[in-house]
Image (spheres, rainbow, N blue to C red):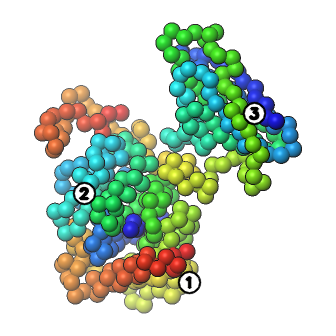
Amino acid sequence: MILAVAGGKGGVGKSTVALNLGARLDAVVVDADLAMADLAARRGPDLHDVLAGRADPLEAVREEGAIRLLPCGRTLAGARAGDVTALVTAVEAVEAAYDRVVIDCPAGMAADAGMPLLAADAAVLVAAPQEFALADALRTRELARELDAGLAAVALNRTGESPPTAEVRRALGAPVVAIPDDERVRRAQRHGSPVAELAPESRPAGRFEKLAEETRLAVTTPSSVP
Amino acid sequence: MVELDSRVETRDGVALVELVVRNPTDTARRFRVGNLLDGPLWPPRSRGVPEAGWDDGGFEGVVPAEERRALGYASPLSGGARSDSLPEPPAEIVWTERAGETEAGNDASFAAEATPEGVVRSLGDHRPPADAVPTPRSGDTVSTPESGRSEPDPRRSP
């Protein structure tokens, strides 16, 4: 199963959702944010090397951290040198070896945002609770649909009291899981860990589990994925 | 049937081929144009990938009824080849067939073609502009963790 964590807008917490969802699903998280990598990694080959044909996708997967991660390089030169069309076969190779892959997609609507959706079986959209942020989520949903990645679930990220879950569900037409704003999520993220590692009983940890459940459900019953 | 007009111009050792495919019939026709030059075919590219319809040997596409379609490609002359010894014509119509009614003349949308190249063609290049990438200072080297050797980092090449 290849799952793309997408959402047209930057800064809504795609990397956080990808990392926590990847941990819950026991998946390899691929940081596909080619120009603005977000998931920290130590030295070794990364996705830039894979896309430039200098490394095998499997040797770029790190297993030593809290989650299995295929990190991305952080140089602009690396972002320019790689061939983004190679992403699909790279991700499929990781899926063949590890079975489950979660791709952290870049913001925007350029080719680097479309390619993970082309590779993916389903998408999880990350949206901010503000109304204006929904437009980006809608555009990304359309793109995902055109590229045959059905919408599995929506993560409404960093919500406060009474999140607009019902409205978002109406607008996007998929199960919505609200994830409360919580300092512990950010703290865990800074250490490259899911919040469940730092605070297993916390509310956000429970919500990420719920998101993973919704995703599993949508992917195993393909009829619910449009 | 479909007709082909061609013209070749050489510049700096590269043959530039201009083609016009005409369809005088009253139905849209799908066609294939094959390259007859010796050198490899350099298709037109946008955003780093060949335009839709091009492959190593030529182009496949649809020309609408009573319309024309202009095409162009380049091919490097093999060593010593002279521009006046090029095959004439430089390309030929390999086959044509009646096109489906829904097929338009232009097939650049990835709805019809969900491939990595189609995604790049439809959505555009994401890469940072070349000008934004720092150029290497002379003598810049990095060591690769696998080999322990010191070698110029290819990522820093312009």
Mark 3 in CB contact with mark 2 (< 8 angstroms): no
> Relative to residue B153, is residue A136 drawn left or right?
right
Chain letter for the residue marked with disc 1 in the picture: A
Give SS at disc 2: loop
> Relative to residue B8, is residue A126 drawn left or right?
left
Q: CA distance from mark 3 to mark 2?
A: 50 Å
What residue does disc 3 label?
B21
- The residue that appears at 64% across and 30% down in the rendered structure is B34
Q: Is residue A44 above or below residue A65?
A: above
Name the outermost residue toward the bottom: A162
Q: Is residue B73 above or below residue A130?
A: above
- Residue type at numbered disc 3: Val
Compare residues A93 and A118 and report the one nearer the observer. Answer: A93
Q: CA distance from mark 3 to mark 1?
A: 50 Å
What residue does disc 2 label?
A61
Percent coordinates x, y for residue A190 in the rendering: 22, 67
Give SS at disc 3: strand
- The residue that appears at 70% across and 20% down in the rendered structure is B89
Residue A170: numbered disc: 1
> Relative to residue B126, is residue A70 drawn left or right?
left
- Kindly indicate the quadrant of the structure image that contains residue A180: bottom left
Mark 3 in CB contact with mark 1 (< 8 angstroms): no
Chain letter for the residue marked with disc 3 in the picture: B
Percent coordinates x, y for residue A220 in the rendering: 43, 78
Q: CA distance from mark 1 to mark 2?
A: 38 Å
